[in-house]
Amino acid sequence: MAFLYKDNKLMLNNFDVTKFCEAQQQACYFYDVDEILKRLELFKAHLPAKQSIHYAMKANSNTVILKSIAELGLGVDVVSGGELSLALNCGFKAEDIVFSGVGKTHKEIELALNSKIKQINVESPQELLRISEIAKKMNVVASVALRMNPDVDPDTHPYIKTGFRDNKFGMDSSFLPELKSILLNNKENLSLRGLTIHIGSQIVDLNSFKDAIDKTKLVYNELAHAGLKMTTFDVGGGLGMSYEKQNYESDYERIQKYCDVVKESLKDLDIEVLVEPGRIVTARAGILLTQVEYIKSSPYKNFAIVNTGMHHLMRPCLYQAHHEIKPVSYSSKKPMLYDVVGPICESSDVLGYDRLMPELQQGEWLSIFDTGAYGFAMANTYNCHDLPLEFCYKNGELITSH
Ligand code: LLP
């Protein structure tokens, strides 16, 4: 399905968003779960046959969404003990879980090993040693993948680049001798399953993914020559989309092209291909609905002061990210420019600058688009505000998920 305007009213298929808003008293996220599942099905259809999809739940860990993805039989990528426990509670099988992240604690590693997850994506020699020691004490074999840093510099915001030499993530080839020696000396407790990369987020140039995979294949071959046989190659997530144009078809095409690049780049290796998509799966399928509390006009600016802000959606203030903002119901009043701002006591609390909308009124509802990824997931209670509510729409049914 898709969020579309019919007769100047925002609809999700036959569901009237304006009517829904009339019954609300606070800002809320609203997710189209069918759209999320459709996108994952596209990955499934276009990746190589030996594939494993691990949804990056950091993008959106709403439990209705997680349970729906688990019901499809897909996997998940987690980055904390909290995410791992939630994934298990939502029905993901341990063997469908990969665990990423640079700072796994002793307790988190113990939980991962106890749960018997598919693989721990290791980010440093010290982490590998720690895993080996814990596995030894528990008398188990830890299944690990090495996260490489392929030193590529994709075109995206600097805060979300992760595969460049300056980033804290992964390991470059200078780490290989040490990694090999740890692996070979601790064979009874460490089993190398494969390699993994994740070069960053909101990347639209597919060549960056190809470069990163090509560089990592050199490492794969080197390790294979050293007698370390691997069965998985995890290409991470990172596929981006346009926040300026809500074009569902171009997202579908992009997913397909991305899968083609992955398939083509890895066709000469006999391995299972893992992907960890987050944003491209959930971003378009979510909107943040907010009510105008006040209109304030000075000689310089018109402000629409709304009941959400940087505490509910950090992306504009953190990455200067653009999100389309439109009234849920369009009037025929003359268009005016507004800064859409929240209640937080900071001047960075701006959701959108100079947005052209028909003259707004107090009490009117607005929709902030493409907020299904890294929206609620990064929300906080700064200034002691409440978190926003979350609603899911699935199979023609509204599900409250809070
Ligand atoms: N795998 C790993 C190891 C990751 O660190 C991430 C995201 C993903 C997969 C999923 O990446 P995606 O497909 O969503 O790009 N808060 C930022 C995005 C941070 C991404 C962090 N890692 C934003 O709002 O743009």
Image (cartoon, rainbow, N blue to C red):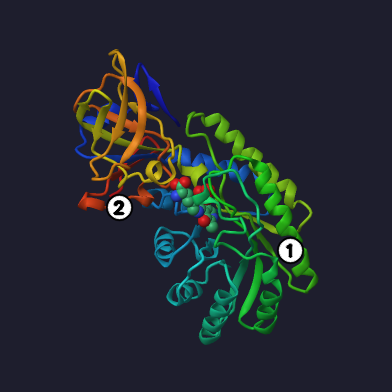
Rendered image: mark on residue 299: none
Q: Amino acid at mark 2?
A: Asn
Quadrant hosting residue 259: top right
Name of the residue lying farthest toward the front: 299
Q: Is residue 72 visible?
A: no
Rendered image: mark on residue 380: 2
Q: Is residue 302 visible?
A: yes
User: Which class describes the residues within 10 Å of circle 2: few (<14), some (14-19), or many (20+)?
Assistant: some
What is the secondary structure assignment of the residue under circle 2? loop
User: Residue, x 52% and y 34% (percent of image)?
Assistant: 242
Q: Amino acid at mark 1?
A: Tyr
- Tell me residue 310's x, y (percent): 32, 44
Measure how far apart labels 1 and 2 are at the Cα level: 41 Å
- Tell me residue 90's x, y (percent): 40, 58
Quadrant hosting residue 5: top left
- Tell me residue 222's x, y (percent): 77, 67
Q: Which residue is mark 1?
A: 220
What is the secondary structure assignment of the residue under circle 1? helix
Mark 1: is the Cβ under 8 angstroms from ligand 1? Answer: no
User: Which class describes the residues within 10 Å of circle 1: few (<14), some (14-19), or many (20+)?
Assistant: some
User: Residue, x 53% and y 40% (percent of image)?
Assistant: 39
Q: Relative to 300, is 267 above or below?
A: below
Marks 1 and 2, the one that precedes in the sequence: 1
User: Residue, x 58% and y 41% (percent of image)?
Assistant: 42
Relative depth, front residue between 127 and 62: 127
Q: Quadrant of the N terminus?
A: top left
Mark 2: is the Cβ under 8 angstroms from ligand 1? Answer: no
Q: Relative to 42, is 180 above or below?
A: below
Q: Relative to 381, is 298 above or below?
A: above
